Image (cartoon, grey):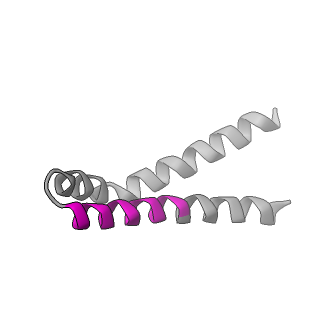
Amino acid sequence: MADDHVLSVIGIAVAIFGFLAVLLVIGQYFGGSWIPVTVGVAQYTFVITIMGLGFYVLFYLAGRR
């Protein structure tokens, strides 16, 4: 049971970092107005990941009750 939760947390982090990596590639490829968006999002990668993990834990704890 605990292994599933560890894998869920790792999966969430990988998915967020993967999405942001794709966003950065799109910004470099298309350029123009995409560059400020990707640079702005990339600065908050860590915060976005921690928020995603926090929401996962919150919903997991709410589901146990």
User: What residue is rendered at 23% in x and 67% in y?
Assistant: 28
Residues in magenta?
A: 15-30
Residue furthest front in the image = 30
Residue furthest right in the image = 1
User: If the image is split into quadrants, where does the C terminus sit?
Assistant: top right
Quadrant housing residue 55:
top right
Across and down, in percent, residue 9 comes to 63, 60
Across and down, in percent, residue 22 comes to 39, 64
Above or below, 21 against 47 in this view is below
Q: Nearer the viewer, residue 32 or 50?
A: 32
Across and down, in percent, residue 48 comes to 42, 51
User: What residue is rendered at 13% in x and 55% in y?
Assistant: 32
Task: From the viewer's perspective, tell me whether residue 4 is left or right of residue 56.
Answer: right
Above or below, 59 against 22 in this view is above
Quadrant housing residue 12:
bottom right
Q: Main secondary structure of the magenta part?
A: helix
Task: From the viewer's perspective, tell me whether residue 15 is left or right of residue 64.
Answer: left
Task: From the viewer's perspective, tell me whether residue 51 is left or right of residue 63.
Answer: left
User: What residue is rendered at 24% in x and 67% in y?
Assistant: 29
Task: From the viewer's perspective, tell me whether residue 34 is left or right of residue 65.
Answer: left
Quadrant housing residue 44:
bottom left
Magenta stretch: includes residue 40: no
Residue furthest left in the image = 32
Q: How many marks?
A: 0
User: If the image is split into quadrants, where does the N terminus sit?
Assistant: bottom right
